[in-house]
Image: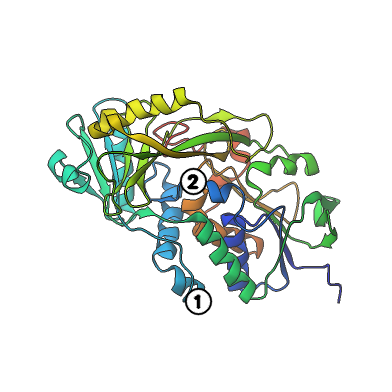
Amino acid sequence: MNMNHHDVIVIGAGVIGSSVAFHLAQLGAQRVLVLDRTQVGAGTTSQSSGILRTHYSVIENVELALTSWQVFKNFADYLGDEEASAGLVKCGYLIASPAGPKLEALRGALQGQRQKGITVQELDAAQATSLLPIARFDDAALIGFEPEAGFADAYLTATGFARAARRRGVKIIEGVEVQQLLHTQGRVTGVETSQGRFTSPVVISTQNIWARDIERWTGIASPVNAERHTVLALQGPEAYTYQMPVYKDLGSLGMLYCRSYGGSQMLVSEGTAGQTLPAPDNEQGDVPMDYVAEVGAQVAERFPSFETAGLASSWTGVYDVTPDWNPVLGRLPDMQGLVVGYGFSGHGFKLSPGVGRVLAQEALGLKTDVLLAPYALERFRKGALLTGRYGVGAVS
């Protein structure tokens, strides 16, 4: 038996790649190999804000998010590992819009969730205040609340999937850089790496911000850019507790999202376009104090007592962004045996269980739980974009 030959090779062991690996094994795949340039979950996965919701204005994302939420709620049972934890905090998701351009988009997205059987409530200002008493809602024209939502830990999730995959026979090799996709006559034959050649008729690329390698290896255009975003942790005079919901503020300039951090601080970031990087780079970037002050001013508009908040910590994370801020999923028709999942644009962790399963199904020639045609690469050529009703850089 050729020890370097595998039935499926997965490139990348972030939360998407680890989920793919687990689901391949769960669906009966044999001889699965995962290769990662660093360590499981150590790339952009570890920089995630961890928010979980099914609220999207792109209905296909709602379906993937709903499937994923069912996994997050029952993570240990789903993996068959009583020690596994996603670090789930089930606190709900609150989203509000003032009168203006975002109002009808919010109304439509809430209706779309209801049509999928998701429990969402429309609250008045008093009800919203009872859930998030540190915020003001006097300008809100519509407030939605999704009780089955919250946040979790992306690194714990990735390592949980990876451990469960290994227990099912998946081989994961860390510290290996894939240098070339091997192919002949339009068909995948394997990969060349820093540790030699591994052959396989099926390769699944979950390379995140490094997905442009696909274009370099195959000549198939891969419309994805690396974009850096800044996350702040603020310590205010009032605690943002674990019982308080995640909040999305469609009325703020940066369409802020925030949640409890450490049980008392506020984790906050903007839901708009970030800094486009000239090349993939997930090292920590600078966080200018002018930017901290700008975001702090927006926070104080919604959370009055946070006018005196201090900066407890900050970090940067990098998104793999496509032109419509939604992922490319499925087979590439010009390269038989190649399946891709990239361009999650900040949605990857939320969708990772569902995406891992459908990519595994696609690779094994099974019917996928969610139709992948809307996520096909060809949509960019055809102009059939998946742009959400909130616009790019938002909640899609």
Q: Which mark is residue 2?
A: none
- Which quadrant holds residue 7? bottom right
Of mark 1 and mark 2, the one earlier in the sequence is 1
In the displayed structure, would residue 41 be above or below residue 323?
Answer: below
Which residue, as the protein is rendered here, is positioned at the far left? Answer: 126
Label 2 packing within 10 angstroms: few (<14), some (14-19), many (20+): many
Residue that label 2 marks: 347
Locate residue 271 relative to residue 324 in the image: left or right: left
Locate residue 86 relative to residue 297 in the image: left or right: right
| Total tally of numbered discs in the picture | 2
The amino acid beneath tag 1 is Gly
Q: Position of residue 261 (x, y in %)?
A: 38, 48
Mark 2 lies on a secondary structure that is: loop
Give me the C-alpha separation between circle 1 and circle 2: 26 Å
- Which quadrant holds residue 380? top right
Q: Position of residue 295 (x, y in %)?
A: 39, 28
The amino acid beneath tag 2 is His
In the displayed structure, would residue 326 be above or below residue 35?
Answer: above
Residue at image coords 45%, 22%: 290
Foreground residue, 384 or 31?
31
Display coloring: rainbow
Foreground residue, 211 or 47?
47
Say if mark 1 contacts mark 2, CB within 8 Å: no
Residue that label 1 marks: 80
Foreground residue, 375 or 200?
200
Q: Quadrant of the C terminus?
A: top left
Residue at image coords 27%, 28%: 301
Label 1 packing within 10 angstroms: few (<14), some (14-19), many (20+): few
